[in-house]
Image (cartoon, helix red, strand yellow):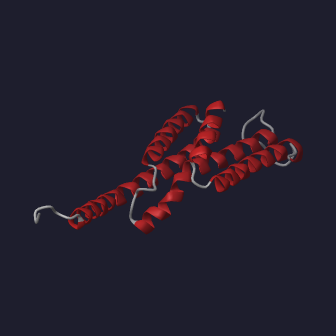
Amino acid sequence: AALMLVWLVMFVKYSSNRGVVLAKIFLVFAAWASMTIAAIFLVRDDWFTPLREGETCRTEFAGLCCIAFNILMYGAPLGAARRVINTRSVESMPIALSVAGLASSILWALYATLLSDRWVGIPNYIGTVLGLIQIAIYLMYCRHSQSEEQRLVQNSTSLQPTHEAC
């Protein structure tokens, strides 16, 4: 939690639009807090039968919330995918984040498979698919982005004055 807090502070400090970033962080925190409050005060233990013996509806609800947020975390870099497709440039897609997310989801999916744990498996199987989609989008457009950059460099060098006439 402390590392995440440090990361958030640094992210807000260096972001160009702090107000929007802080508003989004607040909305995520508010959603998390409201789900926690709902799990504590509103979810009754007789609403449905838990998936595992010995679990309660509250723990099942908490598990479903964790699954939802985990899937959102793995899918977050796909927000840049629309921009990548529209601009045909991968500058806005964080490939390191996509690769790290894919590696993490693969390892957790393997762990869940070995232990037959659905709560860990479901979001990480989906995270693996989302990570593969992110990498595929990057690979589809990275060549195009490189050719655009090369054309820009060529255009900028051809516009520079030459000193041969002097």
> Residue most toward the front?
166
> In the figure, is residue 105 to the left or right of 143?
right
Instruction: Give the residue at x 33% y 60%.
Output: 145
What quarter of the picture does the C terminus occupy? bottom left
Instruction: Give the residue at x 56% y 52%.
Output: 76
Residue 165 appears in which quarter of the rendering? bottom left
Q: Nearer the viewer, residue 29 or 19?
A: 19
Query: Residue 131: percent from the left, percent from the top?
Result: 47, 49
Query: Residue 88: percent from the left, percent from the top?
Result: 39, 65
> In the figure, is residue 156 to the left or right of 69?
left
Instruction: Give the residue at x 81% y 38%.
Output: 56
> In the figure, is residue 147 to the left or right of 75?
left
Query: Residue 13: percent from the left, percent from the top?
Result: 60, 44
What quarter of the picture does the N terminus occupy? top right
Q: Nearer the viewer, residue 44 or 22?
A: 22
Task: Give the number of marks.
Answer: 0
Q: Is residue 35 visible?
A: yes
Query: Residue 21: percent from the left, percent from the top?
Result: 64, 52
> In the figure, is residue 38 to the left or right of 105?
right
Instruction: Give the residue at x 44% y 68%.
Output: 86
Q: Nearer the viewer, residue 30 or 57?
A: 30
| Whether residue 65 is situated above or below residue 108 in the rendered picture | below
Q: Is residue 118 visible?
A: no
